[in-house]
Structures are given as structure tokens and as C-alpha cells.
Image (spheres, grey):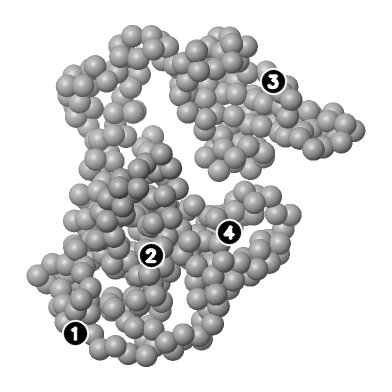
Amino acid sequence: MKSTKWLVFPLLVAALPLGAQTKGTVVEEIVARVNNDVITREDLAKARDSMQGEVHDSCRSCTPEQIQTEIAAKDKNLLRDLIDQSLLVQRAKDASISVDTEVVKRLDAIRQQYKLPSMEALEAEVTKAGQDFEDFKGQIRDQLLTQEVIRKEVGSRIIVSHEEVAKYYADHKSEFVRPETVVLREIFVSTEGKPGADIPALRKKAENLRDRILNKGDDFGEMAKHFSDSPTAQQSGELGAFTRTQLDPNIAEKVFALKHNQMTDLIETKTGFEILQVVERYDAGEQPLDKVEPEISNRLYESKMEPALRAYLVTLRQDSYLQVKPGYTDTAATKFEPIEEVSVTPDKRDTKKKSGRFLGVIPKKSGS
């Protein structure tokens, strides 16, 4: 199964902090036109703020100099990424791609992540954060449209052959010499802060989840996503890879006795009930090709995705009407694009301002 990392386009990482954004009608400077859409100076500023926050969050151990270097490298492509996002969303809409069902699922996942009791409660939180709920849903829709058009029109055309995998393996065998390792995912039912009278019911809940996977064929990852109380729920319970010494000895004894896709019995901890599944297991030493073929295939697939996506975006640009205001740089501009003066036009809109940091989706304004 191919990795889905490539589905997340630059600046579309769903970090989801509940940030605040001031609402109101503003006058803005248009810095780029993308067919019938516009990108404003405020959009660019929001993209920059979001990017800087993400760099700081992802590089907490970096020196100030390293952080500034990373920010400078990303900053030069901010306008390019905003234009690319607009082109991809427009293409998805032109192709009549619908993601309405996926929007509902994503909203419910966000609701669960923040442990909110209802969709009305989610709407109240979004409104409290200073964002119109319809705008919030629109940002999710644009993100999903972007992912789907990339999947259909770029990802589906990328082929990784067995011969390519075998050659990569032969050229990089040293990378696949590993200690005994298990890749784990979890389902966790929390008892923290719950009254003692609730503990039997919570244990029963955990037992039922395990039974559904073991005897009814339900998918472990989906069960984790919808029912686990752990922060790993949104990653389908994925914990990562561990050697024996990285785990508690009692846990190590249990999981290293399991094979691929097997689960532990219910493990009672101080804060709840845990079920662990062995997603993959590697014996010590050089891993055989058939064991690491999916991993290599994903590596090669992802290495092909970026150039394929950029080539696809070039074709979208050639078929589009683009203008960029002098003084601003689109690093993916081609000779086919008319880079012309765009007059500074007061652009008053009645729609409420969007918070790019809230969703990790850079907001895009609609123009006529």
C-alpha cells in the first residue's frame, strides 16, 4: 500500500491548534490573480505567520540560526504555494470532484480530537476562535479537493516496478540491517479522572473493541481512529518502531512474542486499558527484500511524486490566466505566464476573515 504523505500539499498540513482570528471587513491589496481568484497581501501575511509557527513547532531543538535558515528557505516559495493551491482547487471543481462526505468525516474527526460532544459544540468553538463556521468548512473542503485532484491526476500515474525496488535494495542493503524491531499501534481507553464505578464499563468497552477486531474483522486503525482516547487516534493509533530496549520489559515480552497483525490481550495501566497490535516485525540482521519491499516502494513513490506534481502544476499554469504584482515573486513562474502590473485595488468583501493557522490551510479569497 502506498504512503499517503504525498497527499498533503505544501502548506496544507492539518495542525489544528484552536487559534484566534479577528473578524471584520477590510480593504486589501491584491498581489496575484489566478483566473477568477485573488491572493491578497493579507493572505500572504497569514501564510507567513502559519509557516513560521510550523517551523518553530517542528524544530524545537534547533538553534535560532537554524530556524531562521529554514524560514528563509520556505518564505521564498510562499506565493508559489498559494498560487498552486488555488490552481489545484479550481481544477478539482472543474472536474466536478465532490468531497462532501469526506468533509463531514473530517469535521467529526476534529470534534473527536478536541473531545467535543457534538457538531454544535465544534461550531461554537470555531466561532469563539473568531472564525465563521462556513469558512472553516470551506477550508477543509479546499484541502480535500486539493488532495483528491493530486491523487487522481498525479498519483494514479506514478508506477514503481518490482525491478526498481530490487535495484534500490541492492544499492542500499546497509540501510536494511536492523536490530530486532516491532512496529506498533494502539487503542487506549482512558480511566483517568473517572469514578471507580465507571471502570468495569470502560474495561468492557476495551474488550469489545478487541473482540470486534479479532472476531468480526473490523480494522484496527479505524477502531483506533474512532474510539481510542490516545493522542495517536488521528494517526490510526500508530506508535512507531521499537527495539526491545526501548520498551518496558513486560510490554516487550508481550509484543515480541507476536507476529504480524497480532494483538496483545488487554493491558491494564494506571490510567486505562491498552491494546497493542504488531503492524510489522523485523528479525535482527539484514532484512530480506520481501520484508522491506513496501517500505522501498513508498520511498520511490514519494521521490517521484514531487517532480510529477511540479510538472502537473506547470501544465495548469500554462492553461491559466495569472498575474503577479511587481515586487512579489512567484518562484514557479514560466515563460507562458503574463507577469504584469496588478493595480492596487481596494477589495472589500463581506465574508469573514479566515484563520490559516486554525486549520493549517492557507485561506484563499474568491474574486469575480
Residue tagged 4 = 18
Q: How many marks?
A: 4
Amino acid residing under circle 3: Ile
Up-down relation of residue 331 to residue 112 (above or below): below
| Residues at marks 2 and 4, CA–CA distance in whole angstroms | 16 Å
Q: Which residue is mark 1?
A: 341
Q: Mark 3 or mark 2: which comes first in sequence?
A: 2
SS at mark 1?
loop
**Residue labelled with disc 3:** 267
Percent position (x, y) of residue 19?
A: 55, 62
| Kind of element beneath mark 3 | strand
Three-letter amino acid code of the residue under disc 1: Glu
Q: Are marks 2 and 4 in contact (CB under 8 Å)?
A: no
Where is 218 relative to 139, above or below?
A: above
Q: Residue at x 64, y 54 (%)?
A: 111
Residue receiving disc 2: 47
Decide which of tag 3 and tag 4 comes sooner along the chain: 4
